[in-house]
Every structure is written in C-alpha cells, then in structure tokens.
Amino acid sequence: DFRRVLFRSIGIAIALDPLPLIPFILILTSRRGTAKAIAFLIGWFLTLSIITAGTLLLTGGSPPSSGSVPTTAGLAVRIAIGVGLVAFGLYRRARIGKPPRKPKKEPGWQKSIDNMSLWFAVLLAPITQPWGLMAAGVTAVMEADVASAASVVLLVVFVLLASSTYLGLVIFALIRQDRAHEVALSMRAWIEGHLQQALAYGSLLVGLFLIGSGTYQLIA
C-alpha cells in the first residue's frame, strides 16, 4: 500500500545520500577501519532507533486520526521538506560545471582518522546523518500503528533500508576486507566525481516525491 512505498522510498533515499557515505568510506578504509566502521554503524542504528522510538512515544504507538492537527502538521512538514529539497536541487543543478566558490577545509577529524577512537566513530554517525530526510522519515513513522504486525515490520524494514549501504559494506569488509576497501574507494571516487549531479537530481527527485505524497494524503 501507500505506506510501504513511503517508508521504502525514504529509507532508500537515506541509504543512498552521498554526503554521509563519504566520511563512512574514509573510516572504513582507514587503519582498523572495519572496527571503526562497525562502531559508526552502531551509532547510525542507535540514532535511527531512538528517533523511531521517540516518535512512537509521542504518538502513543497509534497514528493520529486523519484530518487531525498532528496529522496535518506532519504532512505540512513533509511538504515543506520537499520544497526545501527541490530548492536545494535547483541550486545544485545551477552550480553543475562551475568551480566551488570557496575551497573547503579538511575537517579536523579527517586529519587524524587513522587514530580515531571507536567512541568517536559512534558519535560521528548522528552528526553525519541527513537530518532533512530523517525529519521526513519521522512524518512517515507518525503513521505507524504498533498494534499492527504489518506496521512493526514496516518500521524494521525502514531502519534496515536506511542503513543498508553501510551494513552491506561492513558485512563485505568482514568477509573480504581488501576487496571491500577496493569497492568502497571506487564508490568514493564515483561519488566525488558526480557529487553535484547526485545532489541536484537526487534532491529534486526526493523533494518532488515528498511534496506529492504529502499533498496526496492531505487531499485524500
């Protein structure tokens, strides 16, 4: 049904967001990278789980009634996030092929990544998560009913989908570390070479989906 499409779409968008993937790949391919990547993944899972559980506590585990103030506010927030993503996508599209206005400084943590502690890797996960998409995920979680087994499965699928890229790379590194590092470095090279396009068209696609889904639910 529509809720499945909504959960899966937002989960996939979070998993494929290129901005958090770059620091994760740097961590994975650093010294003791697999252990630090697992720590990062734990932080990622914890953040998603806390946000999901917190949203369910606020709703009491049952979706607000259709047309109620919380439902309308949630859909309005989703539409607003979609509008913001579309605007960001259009801005990024206009910047394709143009040199960056200011060269970005290398983050302090990146300079000492080989000596990064596991605790720092855990804490880095929530810092790098795409919070705009996470907020859109909250508007979907608001519609979950924990009394329904199907809704519980959807929530689990959402968390797993949103973590799938990171989970897949960690599992691959545990099985074949050298090959996993090669794949991760190839992914990083592709992301950095196509970052403007990925951000532009990805933001436009996700933004239009959020606007469309929120508008559809408001009307329906």
Image (cartoon, rainbow, N blue to C red):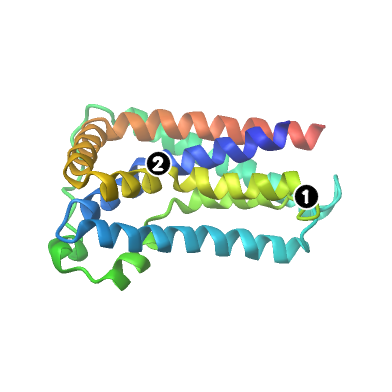
Residue 132 lies, in percent from the top left, at: 50, 49
**Which quadrant of the rendered structure holds the C terminus?**
top right
Residue 72 lies, in percent from the top left, at: 77, 47
Residue at disc 2, secondary structure: loop
Q: Which of marks 2 and 1 is nearer the N terminus?
A: 2
Q: Residues within 10 Å of mark 1 (few under 14, many from 20)?
A: some
* Residue found at the very far front of the displayed protein: 175
In the image: residue 168, left or right of residue 83:
left
Residue occupying the point 45% across, 35% down: 203
Which kind of residue does numbered mark 1 sit on? Thr
Q: Residue 17 carries which label?
A: 2
Judge whether residue 150 can be spotted in this image: yes
Residue at disc 1, secondary structure: helix
Judge whether residue 140 can be spotted in this image: no
Label 2 with label 1: CB-CB less than 8 Å: no
Which kind of residue does numbered mark 2 sit on? Asp
Distance from the alpha carbon under mark 2 to that under mark 1: 27 Å
Asked if 196 appears above or below 155 in the picture, the reply is: above
In the image: residue 60, left or right of residue 99:
right
Q: How crowded is mark 2: few (under 14 residues within 10 Å), some or many (20 or more)?
A: many
Q: Which mark is residue 156?
A: none
Asked if 123 appears above or below 177 in the picture, the reply is: below
Residue occupying the point 60% across, 44% down: 80
Residue occupying the point 34% across, 47% down: 171
Residue under numbered circle 1:
71
Q: Count every numbered label the image shows and give the total.
A: 2
Residue 127 lies, in percent from the top left, at: 38, 62
Of circles 2 and 1, the one toward us is: 2
Residue 97 lies, in percent from the top left, at: 22, 27
**Which quadrant of the rendered structure holds the N terminus?**
top right
Q: Quadrant of residue 7?
A: top right
